[in-house]
Amino acid sequence: RAEGGEKYLMIGGKDRNGDLVSFSDPINPDLGFTYYFVDNVYLAPCPNQRITRFELDTTLCEGAQLKIEGLADAISYRWNKGGVKRSQVIRSSGTYILDNHYDCEVVQQIFVVDFDACDCNLKLPTLVRNFEYQDIDVSPIVQDWKLSLFDAAGQRLVSTNSNLENLSDWVFETSGPYFWLAQLQCWGPNDKLFSRTTSGKMIIQN
């Protein structure tokens, strides 16, 4: 696909010295040369060129790798960081943009990838006020977890599973210190699950 300012259309390629190279080795090596007939070549303008974009954001743990690839039915591909293959394997954070070419249409995929130092952990806010949205921070490698809440006397008040995304559903009748205990199931190396228990303290302020 032309970008503007071109003067020639070349079929084939060049080597490092700038010399034209053949499509393949000669069919008959004893002959020393081969003819290739190329037909139905045309150059035409794209009247209504269209670019469609869509994004994918993902976070992985450091040391992992991610294969990103273009659309299977595209005619050709071009990456913003270099390369014309359909897929590539990445191991570092960044924004990877791939143009999938369909004659006069370009479908652009934007992959925003972030590699983080993941650990098997769950964090709750230290200060909690009733009826406020309070996030539960869960590490990406946590597959499942169970959370239990205790009062200052050590009495279990409530338990919940990983369906809970924040603490807004919990209503605390009394202000003061509370303690929580989380039992975690996390993905480890070689995609094996392991268990970990963590705990913490919260101050409830009504």
Image: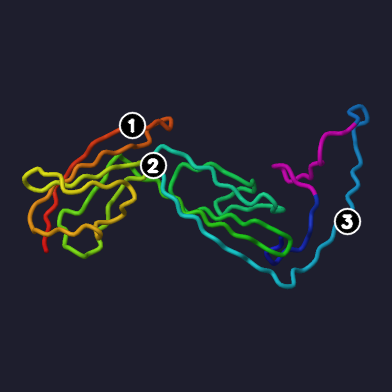
Q: Residue furthest right?
A: 31
> Which residue sits at x=43%, y=38%?
64
Mark 2 Cα-neighbour bin, 10 Å: few <14, some 14–19, many ≥20 = some
Looking at the rendered image, the disc whose residue lies closer to the viewer, 2 or 1, is: 1
Q: Is residue 189 left or right of residue 166?
A: right
Of the numbered discs 2 and 1, the one sitting upstream in the chain is 2
Figure quadrant of the C terminus? bottom left
Region rendered in magenta:
12-27
Q: Amino acid at mark 2?
A: Cys
Q: Residue 165: x percent and y percent?
A: 31, 54
**Contact, mark 2 vs mark 3 (Cβ under 8 Å):** no
Look at the image and say whether residue 18 sits in the magenta stretch: yes
Task: Locate residue 6, reporting x and y percent.
Answer: 73, 63
Q: Quadrant of residue 63?
A: top left
The residue identified by callout 1 is 194
Question: Reading the chain from its start, which is encountered first: label 2 or label 3?
Answer: 3
Q: Disc 3 marks which residue?
A: 40
Q: Amino acid at mark 3?
A: Asn
C-alpha distance separating marks 2 and 3: 49 Å
Say what secondary structure mark 1 lies in: strand
Q: Position of residue 29 (x, y in %)?
A: 89, 28
Asked if residue 30 is among those painted magenta in the image, a careful observer would answer no
Amino acid carrying mark 1 in the image: Phe
Sequence order check, earlier mark of 1 and 3: 3
Give the CA separation, mark 2 to mark 1. 16 Å
In this rendered view, identify the residue nearer to me: 96 or 164.
Answer: 164
Name the residue at 26% across, 45% down: 122
